[in-house]
Amino acid sequence: RLNLTKKIVQGGYDGNWKGWELPEKGVLEADIVVINMADRHSNTIHASDFRILTKAMESTGSDSAKLSLLKQALTAYFVDCNQAMMLLLQFARDASRELALVMMFSVMMDRKNMFLCHAALSERSRFNLHKRLGALYMMNRTDP
């Protein structure tokens, strides 16, 4: 249970959104994404570590086990969009690919290129991710 006031800080709701009021009761669903900003000394996962991760994921049978393995790996590494695309292709189900991309979003070095991951996603997943992460992250900014 979460108590909300009509004042949410840091770029959130400030009480002035036109046409929307905080409901008195009901269920509020939200995706909260914390972005781990890479500093200029950060690098993506090294190629040998990436190979180990992909081989471990390949040897894991279910998508849920792969998601668990990916979640553990992402606590220590940043990824780029090409690596994210290769990791997405490890999953059989589209819903698992969505979850994996949401997990990788916070440690992605080049979020502006997330549109490169479209090839691994269905139309429905792309729509869902537009809602969850924001359309600007899912668009090719050079060719909107």
Image (cartoon, rainbow, N blue to C red):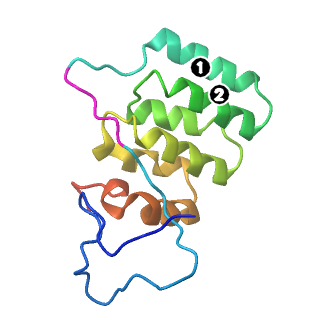
**Residue at 60%, 38% in the rendered image:** 89
Give, as a three-letter code, the residue at label 1. Answer: Leu
**Residue at 30%, 54% in the rendered image:** 140
Q: Residues within 10 Å of mark 2 (few under 14, many from 20)?
A: some
Look at the numbered disc 1 and give the secondary structure of its residue. Answer: helix
* Vertical comparison of 27 with 131: above or below: below
Q: Residue 53: which disc?
A: 1
Task: Tell me where residue 80 appears, x and y as whole percent.
Answer: 38, 31
From the image, give the main secondary structure of the stretch colored magenta. loop
Mark 2 and mark 1 in contact (Cβ < 8 Å)? yes
Give, as a three-letter code, the residue at label 2. Answer: Leu
Question: Would you identify the image quadrant in which residue 10 lies?
Answer: bottom left
* Vertical comparison of 63 with 74: above or below: below
Q: Nearer the viewer, mark 1 or mark 2?
A: 2
* Vertical comparison of 137 with 103: above or below: below
Q: Please state which of residues 35 and 94 is positioned toward the viewer in this rendering.
A: 35
Task: Tell me where residue 65 appears, x and y as whole percent.
Answer: 73, 33
Task: Tell me where residue 138 appears, x and y as whole percent.
Answer: 37, 56
User: Does the stretch in magenta take in 39?
Assistant: yes
Q: Is residue 70 left or right of residue 21?
A: right
Residue under label 2: 69
The region drawn magenta spans 35-40
Q: Residue 73: which disc?
A: none
